[in-house]
């Protein structure tokens, strides 16, 4: 009887230790994942947008009445942030002319360097993680105001 009792105690203690380890690893993994994800900033800082040109698309393309094509130069200073925003109904493309940016979409992030381009669709935010200003040429289609 005492052998059965001591085996039961060891099984109980072993099970307890395994459950405690699983819980500890789960908490550590959640903490690491939470600290790796950044909260999307809603405000922009250190960002300058300069309209370079715009075209009324209505007279140029059938079905595009009330839409315009715009090209901007966007400069994001080191440490600057283009806050979370949506391109719903305003799709576009961007070309990184100088520097680099880190673009965040949901829980994914990607760094773009000078000479690379990205799609301006959906919702996202970006930050300049470099030591020099990042300069982008951004072209979008948007509604006339």
Image (spheres, grey):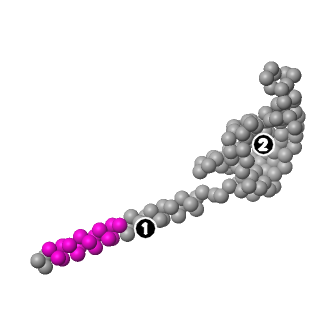
Mark 1 is surrounded, within 10 Å at the Cα level, by few (under 14), some (14 to 19) or many (20 or more) other residues, namely few
Q: Could you say where residue 69 lies in the image, as x and y percent from the top left?
A: 82, 32
* Picture residue at 23% right of the left edge, 73% below the top: 10
* Dominant secondary-structure state across the stretch colored magenta: helix
Query: What quarter of the picture does the C terminus occupy?
Result: top right
Q: Could you say where residue 143 lies in the image, as x and y percent from the top left?
A: 82, 35
Contact check, label 2 and label 1, Cβ < 8 Å: no
Q: Secondary structure at mark 2?
A: strand
* Picture residue at 81% right of the left edge, 45% below the top: 74
Name the residue that disc number 2 marks.
136
Tell me where the magenta segment starts and ends, as one range. 4-19
Distance from the alpha carbon under mark 2 to that under mark 1: 44 Å
**Residue 56 sits in which quadrant?**
top right
Q: Is residue 78 magenta?
A: no
* Picture residue at 11% right of the left edge, 77% below the top: 1
Mark 2 is surrounded, within 10 Å at the Cα level, by few (under 14), some (14 to 19) or many (20 or more) other residues, namely many
**Residue 68 sits in which quadrant?**
top right
* Observer-nearest of 113 and 1: 1
Relative placement, left or right, of 91 versus 31 is: right
Name the residue that disc number 1 marks.
24
């Amino acid at each position: 009887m005492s052998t059965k009792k001591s085996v039961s105690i060891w099984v109980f203690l072993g099970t307890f230790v395994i459950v405690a380890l699983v819980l500890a690893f789960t908490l550590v993994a959640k903490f690491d994942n939470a600290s790796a994800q950044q909260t999307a900033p809603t405000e922009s800082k250190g960002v300058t947008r300069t309209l370079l040109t715009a075209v009324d698309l209505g007279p140029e393309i059938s079905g595009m009445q009330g839409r315009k094509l715009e090209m901007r130069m966007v400069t994001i200073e080191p440490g600057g942030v283009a806050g979370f925003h949506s391109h719903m109904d305003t799709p576009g493309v961007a070309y990184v002319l100088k520097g680099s940016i880190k673009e965040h979409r949901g829980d994914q992030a990607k760094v773009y360097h000078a000479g690379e381009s990205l799609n301006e669709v959906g919702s996202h935010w970006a930050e300049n993680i470099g030591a020099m200003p990042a300069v982008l040429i951004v072209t979008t289609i948007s509604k006339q105001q």
